[in-house]
Amino acid sequence: MEKTITKDLLKNELYSDGRPAGELLYSRYSGMLYSYILQFVSEAEAGTLLVDIFARLTPQLNEAFDSSLSVYCWLQIESRKIILEHLRKRGDEAAGDRGPAVAASYFSLLEDALPEHQWVFREVFLYGKSKEDLALESGRDLSYVTQLLRECLGMIRKNLG
């Protein structure tokens, strides 16, 4: 695996006459981000979305420098926001397109979970709904929704191990 990019290396590239920082990021992390994007959208959309993500995040690199996260973690978190925005814009009529890729990667790890657990995980993690909104919509207590999500993450961790 290629060496990860430290914030100092990225800053040096950004402020030097060398290869542009966006190109450096793309060469090191595009493969990993592409795999991540495929968990949410089809291959037909993934390439275009990947380019959009790098185009939108490269000008925001100072935020990555100020973050306590590694460069890749910051990219992944910010990419998820862009992916969720893309899915919202695309609309609910395409929601079924997400199913096969997501089911293979996440729901196989939650196949023993109760339907309510699967529902909370899908709404919060995959569709980007806040726990607060989900609790309000379902008439459940926020602590209950938080507990279900925590249990889902525990199940995933257990099934990965």
Image (cartoon, grey):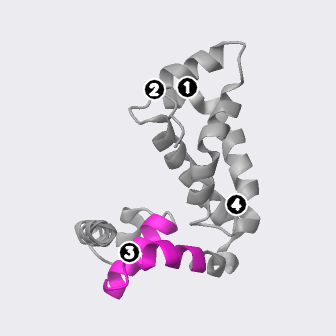
Residue 133, can we see it? yes
Mark 4–mark 3 Cα distance, whole angstroms, equals 25 Å
The single residue placed furthest to the top in the displayed view is 16
Mark 2–mark 4 Cα distance, whole angstroms, equals 28 Å
The circle drawn on residue 73 is none
Q: Residue at x 50, y 67 (%)?
A: 126
Q: Which residue is mark 2?
A: 66
Q: Earlier in the sequence, mark 2 or mark 4?
A: 4
Mark 2–mark 1 Cα distance, whole angstroms, equals 6 Å
Q: Which residue is mark 3?
A: 120
- Dot 2: what SS? helix
Q: Earlier in the sequence, mark 4 or mark 1?
A: 4
Q: What x and y, as percent, mark residue 14? A: 64, 20
Q: What x and y, as percent, mark residue 9? A: 54, 21
Q: Residue at x 41, y 36 (%)?
A: 69
- Please give the range of residues in magenta: 100-126
Within-10-Å neighbours for mark 2: few <14, some 14–19, many 20+? few
Residue type, numbered disc 2: Asp
Q: Residue at x 46, y 43 (%)?
A: 73
The circle drawn on residue 62 is 1
- The overriding secondary structure of the stretch rendered in magenta is helix
The answer to which of 7 and 80 lies nearer the viewer is 7
